[in-house]
Amino acid sequence: MSQFQSIDVNDYYDSETFERIKSFAQDKPTPFVVIDTQIVAKQYQAMVDNFPYASIYYAVKANPAPQVLTLLRDKGANFDIASIYELDMVTELGVSCDRVSYGNTIKKRADVRAFFARGVRMFASDSEADLRMLAEEAPGARVYVRILTEGTHTADWPLSRKFGCQNEMAYDLLVLAKALGLEPYGISFHVGSQQRDIGAWDSAIGKVKSIFDRLSEEHGIILKMINLGGGFPANYIDKTNPLETYAEQITHFLQEDFGDNLPEIIIEPGRSLLSNAGVLVSEVVLISKKSHTALERWVFTDVGKFSGLIETMDEAIKFPIYCERQGELDKCVIAGPTCDSADIMYEHYHYGLPSDLAIGDRLYWLSAGAYTTTYSAVCFNGFPPLKDYYL
Ligand SMILES: Cc1ncc(COP(=O)(O)O)c(C=O)c1O
């Protein structure tokens, strides 16, 4: 067996879907992403079916294209918003502000004022300064406090540490929220994006429960909501459990702590809705070796860390890469087109590409519908942002 990772497209798309994407892509100059919105719809429905008791707040940052937002708007989704610019994107499509949560714990005063004036009433927070500002600019609004969670090492793209605060502080902030005239509404966490250890939700929910109980007993504050964040699985090279298993387990953790009387539950999926709907198509620009005797090839492609693939940083997200040649797989370094030496996507993981790969061949980066288009630089080395098409 080859020591290199071979990719079977059927593990990611049914053949009809992949053929449809490929034939749509055929005449278009690379690089670009093609998103099949039918897959987004299917993934959204899977979330609804697996978490029937939860309200879904789509994490707009994963892909804010109007085609995606419109589809989710029509399916009744709510929206987790990170900035005033994302708020514009969803409200311009007719989404009312009662379907929006301002989920970023880092916000400018002027933006909070604008969110409140436009009717947003739900805000995340994790610090005293932010909370006091919320009390001034969004009086009476619902506030949920984000806690730190474990699980950083088992998520491909960790999110805790920068966001959230320790339990004790979360408790104090919720007490303070009440004193400041805000509504202490609930607690949120994010166990890390592409979280492989479902147990990460167990310990987070346990922490939430203890804050719920203490606030009720010691201050008569009855929290109403838990925001379980994102972290649900997408299908990359390293396999995860299926969404059904995540849902079964998480539901079990919730019931263990809260019994049948669950508070309002919010989930904020991004990656799991979009990733597998997208294929990024790129072209091989150059294949070279660094010496006459070097064994490994360098494969340079027209997409890189600065044109949508920043999540390959530290080789965190391992996109399946498919090409049509069938030659034996050979070791290679896969790098982007810019004059920046950080623009190397994969050097250590055992990626192999066919030995007969040639300049001009297309590479298909599977599961690339989330966190690609918006991460693309606008003009680095003159390259335009990554293009996107929607089927
Ligand atoms: C507050 C918040 N919620 C949800 C998400 C979406 O997470 P995921 O893409 O893992 O579903 C993110 C991602 O950064 C986030 O910051």
Image (cartoon, rainbow, N blue to C red):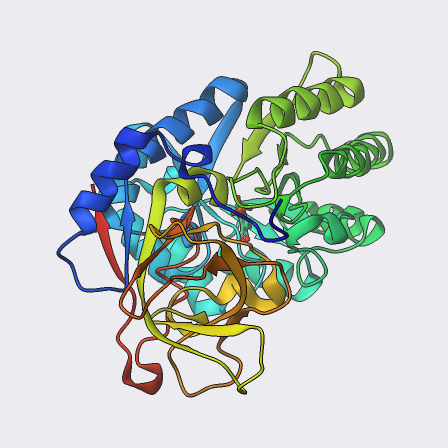
22 displayed left or right of 225: left
Residue farthest top in this picture: 260
Name which residue lies at 68% across and 41% down: 196
Name which residue lies at 55% across and 46% down: 237
155 displayed left or right of 107: right
Quarter of the image for residue 85 reads: bottom left
* Whole-percent x, y for residue 24 in the image: 17, 46
For the N terminus, the image quarter is: top right
Using the image as rendered, state which of residue 338 and residue 8 is in the foreground.
8
For the C terminus, the image quarter is: top left
Can I make out residue 143 in this image? Answer: yes
Using the image as rendered, state which of residue 50 and residue 294 is in the foreground.
294
* Whole-percent x, y for residue 83 in the image: 42, 60
Name which residue lies at 85% across and 35% down: 214
Residue 334 against residue 221 in the figure, above or below: below
178 displayed left or right of 329: right
How many numbered discs, if any? 0
Residue 273 against residue 27 in the figure, above or below: above
Name which residue lies at 78% across and 48% down: 150
Residue farthest left in this picture: 27
Residue 163 against residue 95 in the figure, above or below: below
* Whole-percent x, y for residue 278 in the image: 35, 46
Can I make out residue 148 in this image? Answer: no
Using the image as rendered, state which of residue 256 and residue 169 is in the foreground.
256
Quarter of the image for residue 361 reads: bottom left
* Whole-percent x, y for residue 175 in the image: 75, 46
